[in-house]
């Protein structure tokens, strides 16, 4: 009862304090982090399943051998959203992380595809199977590729070679960019 009376008496101070808290949390990216935390708990899509990607990539990292260390690929189910996973090429591995800031991170390319493509790809046992699968799915429009960097930069990071291997040749000077 005393708390309620205190809030009524100091309503302006309480409101300012509450709005200041919201402002600071937003300024520090807290809501973005809370949204990502919520997605981590509720998202069941194979497109953004970090554990499944990490397991598959551990067995199939040679598919990404053309990429230079530090090169990043974004994968999303819906390009209208910045939510997806980022694959980062390391010296001897590929690191996978979920994000809701795909464009802000700025990977070299973003691949957009649905749950069925992700499920099917994660069944491929080697580089050749994966390449054939990716080429076929891109030809029938099940995989869309978006380039966030100019062709010169894509070439220097190994993306052009990688994209040619999987049948997704980049448009001259990133015509299909975001």
Image (cartoon, grey):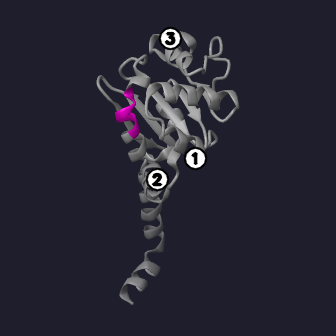
Camera-nearest residue between 32 and 87: 87
Which residue was labeled with disc 3?
155
Q: Residue at x 46, y 58 (%)?
A: 38
Which residue was labeled with disc 1?
115
Camera-nearest residue between 28 and 141: 141
Q: Are marks 2 and 1 in contact (CB under 8 Å)?
A: no
The stretch of residues the image draws in magenta is 56-61
Residue 157 inside the magenta-drawn segment? no
Tag 2's secondary structure? helix
Task: Point out the frontmost of discs 3 and 1.
Answer: 1
In this rendering, is residue 91 above or below 80? above
Dot 2 or dot 1, earlier in sequence: 2
Q: From the image, which quarter does the N terminus lie in? A: bottom left
Q: Residue at x 61, y 27 (%)?
A: 146
Camera-nearest residue between 123 and 4: 123
Camera-nearest residue between 46 and 9: 46
Dot 3 or dot 1, earlier in sequence: 1
Task: Point out the frontmost of discs 2 and 1.
Answer: 1
Query: Where is residue 11 shown, x and y percent of the image?
Result: 47, 74
Q: Residue at x 45, y 51 (%)?
A: 36
Drawn side of residue 135 relative to residue 30, left or right: right
Tag 1's secondary structure? helix
Between the C-alphas of marks 3 and 1, the distance is 29 Å
Query: Where is residue 63 shown, x and y percent of the image?
Result: 44, 24
Which residue was labeled with disc 2?
31
Pointer 3: residues within 10 angstroms few (<14), some, or many (20+)?
some
In this rendering, is residue 130 above or below 115? above
The quarter holding residue 170 reads: top right
Residue 57 inside the magenta-drawn segment? yes
Task: Point out the frontmost of discs 3 and 2.
Answer: 3
């Amino acid at each position: 009862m005393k708390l309620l009376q205190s809030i009524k008496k100091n309503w302006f101070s309480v409101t300012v304090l509450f709005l200041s808290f919201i402002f600071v949390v937003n300024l520090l990216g807290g809501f973005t982090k809370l949204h990502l935390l919520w997605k981590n708990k509720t998202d069941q899509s194979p497109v953004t399943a970090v554990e499944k990607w990490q397991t598959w990539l551990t067995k199939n990292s040679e598919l990404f051998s053309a990429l230079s260390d530090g090169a990043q690929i974004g994968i999303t189910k819906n390009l209208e959203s910045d939510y997806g996973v980022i694959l980062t090429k390391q010296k001897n591995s590929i690191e996978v992380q979920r994000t809701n800031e795909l464009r802000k991170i700025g990977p070299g390319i973003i691949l957009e595809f649905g749950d069925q493509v992700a499920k099917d790809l994660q069944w491929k046992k080697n580089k050749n199977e994966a390449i054939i699968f990716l080429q076929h799915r891109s030809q029938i429009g099940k995989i869309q590729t978006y380039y966030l960097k100019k062709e010169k930069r894509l070439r220097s990071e190994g993306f052009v070679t990688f994209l040619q291997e999987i049948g997704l040749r980049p448009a001259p000077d990133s015509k299909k960019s975001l």
